[in-house]
Each structure stands twice: as C-alpha cells, then as structure tokens.
Amino acid sequence: MGTDSKRGKKAARSNPFRRIGNSFSEFGKRFTDGSVGTKLSHFIFGAGSFYHGQIVKGIIFLLIQLGILAVMIFCPSINNTPYGWKALVNLSLKNAFEGGEFDPATGEMAIGSDCKLMILFGFVTIALIFIYFIVWNLNIASSYKADNDKKVGKKPTTIKEDLKELLDGKFHVLMLTPTCIAATVFTILPTIFMIALAFTTYNQQDMNNLGTNLFKWNGLQNFAAVFTGEGSLGFEIKNRFLPVLGWTFIWAIFATLTCYFGGIILALLINKKDLKGKKVFRTLFILTIAVPQFISLLAVRNLLGEYGPINSLLQSIGWIQEPIGFLGLKATDSEILAKIMVIVVNMWVGIPYTMLMTSGILMNIPTDLYEAARVDGTSTVKMFFKITLPYVIFITTPYLISSFVGNINSFNTIYLLTGGGPTYPGYQAGGTDLLVTWLYKVTIDQGMYNTGAVIGIFTFLITATITLITYRRSKAYNEEDTFQ
Amino acid sequence: MSNNTNKKYRSQSKNRRISLIVTYTILAVMAVIWLIPLLWIFISAFRCEYQPDGTFIGRVTSNFFPRAVGFENFRLLFTETYYGVDHAFVRWIVNTLIISVIDCVISTFLVLSVAYCIAKLKFKLRKAFMNITMILGLFPGFMSMIAIYFLLKSIGLSGNPSHPELSLVGLVLAYSAGAGLGFQIAKGFFDVIPNALVESAKLDGCTNFKVFWKIILPLAKPIIIYQALMSFTGPWMDFIFAKVIIGADNAKYWTVSVGLYSMLFGTHPDTNLFTQFAAGCVIVAIPIVTLFMFLQKYYVEGVTAGAVKG
Amino acid sequence: MKKLLALLLVLSLTAVIFAGCGSTEEKVIRIWVGEESVEFYQTLCDEYVAAHPDFGYAVQVKGMDTGTIAGTIATDPKAAADIYTAAHDNIGKLASTQCAKPIGDQSLIDQVLADNPESFRNVIYSTLNGTKYLYGVPYISQALFLYYNKALVTEEQAKTFEGLREAAKAAGTKAITVVGDDGYNMSFALLATKVSDHGTTVKIYEGADAVAGGSKGTSNCQGDDTVAIMRWLQDYAADENGFKWASPDGWDADLDKSNNGVLAVIGGAWHYNTAKAALGETNLGIALIPTFTLTEKAVEGLSGVSAGDVYRGGTFADCKCFMINANSSKEKYAKEQELIKFMSSKEAQNRSYLACLNVPAYVGASSYIEQCYKDGKVTESQYNLAAMQVAMAEWGIPQPFITGTLNSYFYSKNAPSVFRAIIDKTAYPTTGDTILSETESLTGVRKALYLVEYLWMHGTVPKEFPTDLPKHD
C-alpha cells in the first residue's frame, strides 16, 4: 500500500454505499429533470431514443426489453425445465416431483424433475433480470444525455457516431464485450452453479441408494459434515481432508522449490561462458516441454511399471529381487516412495521450464556487479549466492507465487503417474491425491457433486488466501496501480 | 611478477577447463535422463515383436530396446477400428486439427483484445475486471467443468444424440470462451510498450482502434505467436475436458489425446495397444515439437514475460 | 455504448434458452451395446428393418463398455440411447432413478419367461411406484472361469489350485491371479462351494425387497467355511508360487511368459482377446475355476469344516440385458420392444455366439454350443470359452443386487478392499476408531468378515467390533 492520501482516495472511489447513494439521487434527478422521452424510458425501453430520433438505438433497447419480458412471462422450457418466472419459483426445488407414473400399454412414463437444470436455469434467469436492469439504466442514461446535448445546442448522436465512438473512446467496450459474454456464460455461471451445489444434497451415490433422482437444498449441512463426519460426504472429508491438504502443501512446496532451483542451476550450467553447444542443450530440454504431458508422463509411468524396463534392469543387475512399486499403483506399495517419485518426476517436467525462464534473466544481470566482485576476489560459488540468486529471486517472485498456486492445482503429474495411489481402502482420496485430483475423482468418477463443490470451495479459499497475502505485498501489484 | 601472473593465469585456465569438462559431463548426463522416456516411446512405436504363433505383442515389455522393428504399429493405427469407429485415429487427428485451428484464432484474438484494453486503456471498471478475473482464476478448473457440460447440453452442443458432431462446436466454445481471462502474459508484454508511443499517435488523431491495429499489433508479433502456439497446442494435450464435453460414447468425435489416453486408461483399456499408443504419440508429438522448435524464440519470450510479470 | 454489450449478452442468453426448443423427433432408434458386438447388432438390426418395411425407424448401434453405459445413464439419462445394454445388477439402480422403462409387451415378457433360467428370472424385475415390472431382457450370460498357459500347465494340474502351484514351482513363477480385486472378481473366493454338495454358508441379500429403502434381506459371510477359505487363501497367497494380485501393468503382463508372472488367471469371456494376445491361441487353455483342499492349518480352531474338504472357486453367473431408456419417447415404445424381442430371440443369441462369442443366456444353449463345435464352426478354445462359462453357472449365483442400494453397498462401500486386506494380511484402516490390525490371526479374519458383512448391510463401518463373533446385525 502506498501513502495515506492514496489509500483515502482509493477508499472513496470504491466505497460501494456512497456510489449507490449517488446513483439513487441521480435516478430521481433523471426522472424529474428529463424530457418526456426520458420519463417514458423508465417504462418503455428505447422511448427516449425514439423521442430523440435515434431509431436504431431505440429498436435495440425495445428488442432487449421485449425479449427478456417474453422469456420471463412465457417461460420457454428445455428438457421439461422452464426459464422465466417459473425458474425463479423452481429455484427453491420445493416443487420438484418424483415422476414414475407408467402405463405399460402405451409406454408413457412421467419423468421426474431435473433438479440440476432447475438450479441452472434459475441462475440464468437471475442473470437475465440483472441485465434487464442494466439495460434499463443505460436506456435512461442515453436519453438523458441526449436531453443535455439538446440543452447545450448539440444534436443527439446518430447511430453512425455511436459506432464510430466504439472504435475510439469506447474501444474497450468493443474489445471486452466478447470476453465478458463468454466469461459470464462459461465461467461465472458455471462457477456460481457449482458453488450452489455445495449447499444441496446432490450426490449421485446417495441418490442411487435412496432410489431417487431428486435432490434438495440442505443449507450448511455439508460444511458441518466436514467436522461431524456424518453421511457419505462427511466420512470421506472428515478423515481425508487434513491428510490431503497437508500433502498438497508439502507437494506444492517441494515441487515449486525443486523445479525452481533445479532450473536456475541448469540455466547457469547451460549459460556458462565458453560452453559450446548451448543451443543444442537448450533445444534438448525444450523438447520435453513440447511433448504433451500425457505422453511423457505415461511413458515414465510405464517405464517404472512392475514389468517395465527399469524394474527388470534393476532385477537383472541384482540390486532388487522383487519389482518395486515406484508409483503406489498397488494398495500395498509404499506411500512415501510414491510421494518421492512424483516429486522427482515432476522435476523432470518442471526444470526445463524454469531453465528457459531464468536463462533470459541471467543474461540480463548487470555485468558490472560481477566485475566488481571479481576484483574483490570473490569465489564463483559466493558470487552465485551473493549476486545471481538474490537477483533472480527478486525478479521472479511473482512467478514463484504463481507457480506455487499452480502446483496446488497441478493435476496431470499426479493423475497420470500415480492416479492418487496407493489407495486408502474406504476412501476416494489415496496417498498421493491432491485436492484437485480428489475433486476430480469425487465429481467426475463418483458423481458426488456436493462433496466436490465443498472440496472446490476449500481449495479456492486456500489459494485465494495465499494469493491475496503474497500478491498484495508484491511489487507488481503495487506498481500496477500507478503505471498509467 | 609477470611470471607469477602467467602462472596464475595458466592455473586459472586449467581450472576453467576442468570446470568446463565437469559442466559438459553434468549436462550430458542430464540430457540423457531427460531424453530416455521420450526415446523409449519413440522406439516403442517402431517395435514389431511377435509371439511364436504369430500374435502381435503390443504391451510393455521388459526390454528397453525392441527385438525387431517395423512400421506395423503405424499401419494398425491408421487401419484399425477403435471403439467401433473405422479409421478412428485419422478422424481424431482431423477433429483435433479443426478444433485447435478455430480455438487458436478465437483465443488469440480474445487474449490480445483484453490484454490491450487492460494495459493501455483507461476505463471505469478496469480494476474491477482484473480483480474478478483473478478471483475466477483461483477456482479449480474442474469445478466448473461438469456445469459447462450441463450448460452445453441444455443448448444441444454436447451430448446431443441426434447431432453428436455438435459436441465439437461445444468443445471449441468451452476451450476459447475463457481464453480472454488469461490475458496476464500478453498484458505484461503490452505494459512494456512505452505509453509515449500511444500518446503521440493519439495526438496525431489516431483513434484507439487505429492505435491498436496500426501500432500495437505490428509490435506484438512475438506475443501473438506465443498465444497462438499455446492455444493451438492446448487441444492436442488436453484429455480430461475434451472427454467430458464430447462424451465417452462419442468416440467418432474424440480428440486425438482422448483417443490415445483411452487406449491405455479408458473404461476398456487394452494393455496390448501400448505400441500403437506409442505410434500415435509419435505422430502427435512430431508436429507439435517441430512447431515449438521453429517458434522457440517466441515461446521463450512469452515464458520470460510471464515469469517476470506474474 | 454498453448497449451493444448488453444486446449481445441478451441475444446469446436468449439463444441459449431457445436453441434447445426447436429440436424435432427423429425416426431413429439408438442402441448401445458392448464394444465387441457393435457390428453384429448393426447388421442384425439392419436386416430386420429391411425385412420389415413397416417398421418405420432406422437403427443406429454404438459400442460402449457396459460399466460406462451404466455410469453415463445414471448421470445423464437424456443423453443416452433408446435401448441400452446393462449387466442385470444395475437394474435396481437404473429403475429407481428413472433411467429405465419397464417392459410392457406381454409377448416379449412371455418370451423372456419361457427362455431364461429361473436364476435370471429372479433378478430382472424391479419396482416402480409399488408395482413390480420386468425391466431387463437377458441376451448374454457371463461367468468367471480360468485361463491358463497350456505350455507350462497340464490339463490335470489346471484342475486344482495345488496342481497350479506345483506347475508354478517348476516354472519359477506364481500360480494364479485374478483380473481385478473388485467385488465382482472376488466372487471366486467368496462364492467357493463344497464340491461334494455345492454347500456354502454365504448369503448375500437373500429375500431382499426390490424397493429402494426396503428390507435388505439376510446376509452372511462369517461362516466357518468362509473363514477357513480365507485362511487357506492367505497361505496360498503367501506361498512364493501361489496367488498374486494382478500387476498394475495389466494382468496380461503377468500372464506373458517372458515376465515370469503367473501361469493362470481367473477372468471372463471379455478378456479372451487379451489373454490370447498374451499367450497365443495354441497355448491358451480354458478350464473351470479350480478346486482346492482345505489344509489342517486353515481349519484350525474351526468347527463344521475339516481338513481335506474340497471346495471349488465360485463366480457370479450373470446376464447382460437389453433395457429401454425411460426418456425414450412413447411413440418408439412398441417398436423398441419389437426390436428387443428380435434381438434377444434364441436365433439372434445363437448368431451372436458365432459372430462375437457372446454366450447365449437362454436355457439349453449348451447343446447349440456343442453342436457348433462338432460342426467345426468354432475352434476348440472358442468352444471351451462358452462351455466353461455354461458349466461355471452351476457353481455360482447371479448378482443379487435388486436395488441400487444393494449394488452400491456391496461394491462401493469398500467391502472388496477388506478382502484384499485379509489376503494381504495387512491392517485395514477404516475410520480410525476401528482399525483392524490383526488380519493374520483367526480372530482377525473373523473380524474382517464381520466388517464385510456390516458394510454390505449398513454401507458404513461399525462403531466397534462385538466380542462374540460370529454375530449378525
């Protein structure tokens, strides 16, 4: 954080209450001060635009209003699940029905409600209502602006001028619109939906056991279950959450640091003065980055298999009698070994990446620093610890943080190498499972969506905390505020 | 005195030679370790061993080097019917190619447009946009995966029994829709372009669009290539998202990574398909690796920019 | 200019809303069958459609693993085919979650009842709104049996576990493995019966109600014979030439003789091609699951069993069924049943045996199988494959999981991993309160089996172990 004055300014800018208060007074002013068109705009979208002769704009506003209202009133439905006001009612899941009436003669069968779609469509409808009010506000603002333009003797903007403005003053609107739409539909909506599932009984396993395809809201019970260990959800989470969380942290720390320092050392070696064939070496290591991970990791997995080349080599030279279960693929295999192996193999995956990244930075270290040190007779090792390392760490701190968070969410290495094994009898989460691989097993393999959502929310809280603490303190964040 | 320096110099150069030799050795050993798994997949693809009675051996064997080599795996890969789909591998390649090209165009465009706005334009919700993006990025991706499937399915773009091919459209949407939120690296790149350049162009009467089109884009070639490379190779590497969106029953429209992964780890894995899997890997890896090698410079630039900017 | 943004957002959302509405009903019946039989059923149905011009629907067959089918349908029945195949043990689950529609056509019901053995007839029903309906139409039967390496094991040796061990000693390998350690494959040990009278004390959900939440019937797996069998298997697994679990590299890697893994594997017909690839057809022997003789050590401290008793490994003897998707439109219903009736007819089942080695499910299929061998239509191993499955059906029972709960409690609540812990003699960490550490001893085995039974009946681990075992809750 910067100076006090800066903080004060920021607070004023982002105080949501004041902003809301301002907007309300503005709303009232627009209604009283505005022209007939502006007043009418409060009820019929685009009325103001028509009043000011901006026909195209008016039509767009009107279409949006009619479209949303049509959806809200007529409630079109997909898979027997409606949108519109019915979707808002459905959001409670109270009127979900079981179905099952069957007529053996005609084959007619009443299919029960689809609770997940009821929730999903409810959220889509809420999003539509939000948009309705945003457009409502825009259409009034547009008309009010035209009023003011008229007052000072300017003509209201034509559609051509509006479009032109889109390429200049409002260029960001044009450029960000596609991403905003896509993100709303494919990122924000699904994320909210999944968060919502954490507060339901949507668990395919339990539903099968109960012989139903309906689920309902159950408040904070899923989170309470984490502590009480009740139900299929609590049983899994209560007993496995802390071990998995602990291992996730150990993994993230080791995976980040081993790759980081390994990469720096490799970069130093490759960039050593007088070393010939720098390019060849670098290309060789890039090769491992370029090959898709599912290929290289599955290759490693098979190499390390019970009858794979490595075990048979070790057996034939007499180092071992029985094959070693390196990757914990059997329940009786060593968990510690599996954990060590994934970290080691992960170095194989990650070191070339850090090497590439730090190479550029190493070459940019001001040479006068070294010259000065050399004159003082400092040894190479000392120079590394006194100059190179601090410099590189200083520059790459943001990377270190993001790679730590990335490793918390690292899926491929674990999933492809050990599949989370060795398994713990009785649980989905095995010895090397991270929060993400656990989340995957629980949702995709087992259909325990509420459990998955709870795990996902916990993962989010953890990564968010780490990121907030470190990112807020970092140079990049604080400079970001002042860059323009 | 001069004699002394000479000696010192000579011993220094000797030291340097020794340290060079050590470096070479370490690097060589590391290179071998790094290449062994890839080499193994490569030679497994050409393995061509048979049982005494003529049955083809496709599973992992304990010998690192094959006892016999040939192109049988490649022949099988292109002619066999996998998962009830004729010429499945060729189809998978074509599917992946289509998806990756479209995804590449859309994603690159979205990333650049967002990055430019955030880096070089001032507007009201800029900071809010960045914060929301950051928060969204902290949710594990798998969490929303199944919801995206339900969403796509409800509009018929996934799991649509009468039009299974629409799943490809769904997958492109799923891949590219979120691309704009990964603008950080490109933004880091644009940040470095001096603001003065933009300001002076604006003084000359350039619109924001013209600044972007005429000034920024030509300067942004490295980052364009980096983003294009990343989004093009993405679909070749993803085996989880694609399977959920396209569906386990929809083998005809799988991407190549889903197909290859399913050979070994599907619900119907066949360990005897390992060498064919390896052959498939070689076919997939060669173009991607070539691409990486050619565009190495840009890739390194992107990676470095990402590292420093975070 | 946020109008444009808003417009696009609205348009895309409304498009999302309306896009799903316009789809029209197609004249296609979609079928999902096992991957190995796709081509066969496509041809069969095409023939049928061609021969019946008034049928009015095209048929589209897709291949999918049965497990995947059950999974896909449970998550998302609307994306599934009109007719799909499922192992009969999924019927309860699929029916109660409205993924399957009952069979209503009387002539089809009559055909099913007339053709199929009683064991199958009992497990293809389920309940909908209080009424009992027929849900699945059996068309393939399947059971576990033994694949062995003929080059290293004689036919006589393959008849007993002891014989296999002897051969393994000579070859310097392990004797036998099983394709998986799940509840299904573990049936080879669980359902082992005394050869002299087919006797066992094991009961799994006997007399359970076919309604979700209904009675689970009675179960027993703590009988002295089961304890003795587990004790015997512990010793057999500890023997350096005895039993081993399948390698994570695949059981076929075990079977491959260059790896010196095992000489025999217990598996099903769907493993035929892989086993053939591992051994070569000439070396591929197929036999009943072998017998074993209880040792003094195994029966020590037990009553009702004595050393020298001979038991044969058992199996779940199942059927795969055609089922109708509940979401399939009622217009198709009559035609779907017509098609199923045809596809499950004896003639169609016979043809499917010749085309894809699917073992027919109807009563008396063995005589047809024998005839085919005599006529030279199938090879010896292909004949054995079917004949041994039919023979094994006498040494097994169909999976008695008539509701989804029973299926899930048996398979998904970790009872199978307790079996594995017993055989490995490892501790079984359950909830922390009930760690089972002494699986090596007689009481340990008893406790573990109590745990298994408790998991079957309650789906969760007991708070503590009672002191007076055997005890049934």
Image: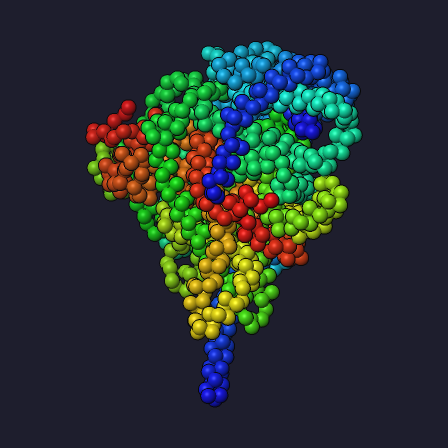
What is the quadrant of the N terminus of chain C in the image? top right
Give residue C263's position: percent from left, percent from top.
43, 49
Q: Quadrant of residue A111?
A: top right
Residue A405 left/right relative to C352? left
Decide if residue C371 is in sight here.
no
User: Would you say A205 lies left or right of B300 here?
Assistant: left
Q: Quadrant of residue C158?
A: top left
Seen in the picture, residue A287 relative to B230 is either above or below; the reply is: below
Residue A5 in sight in this render: yes
Q: Is B63 left, or right, of C194 in this rendering?
A: right
Q: Between residue A170 and residue A248, name the one nearer to us.
A: A170
Camera-nearest residue between A461 and A439:
A461
**Residue B84 position (above or below residue C457):** below
Q: How is the image coloured?
A: rainbow
Question: For the C terminus of chain C, which image quadrant?
Answer: top left
Q: Nearer the viewer, residue B115 or B40?
A: B115
Q: How many marks?
A: 0
Q: Residue furthest toward the front? A: A152
Q: Position of residue B290 (x, y in %)?
A: 66, 56
User: Residue at 46% across / 36% down in the picture?
Assistant: A460
From the top left corner, tell me how far across and down residue B105 is, in percent: 69, 42
Question: What residue do we see at 45% from left, 20% from top?
Answer: A217
Is A157 situated above or below A476? above
Q: Is residue A370 left or right of residue B75?
A: left
Q: Height in image: A52 above or below A245?
A: above
**What residue is shown at x 56% (from left), y 31% (from top)?**
A188
Residue A273: x, y in percent? 54, 70
Q: Residue at x 31, y 38 (%)?
A: C429
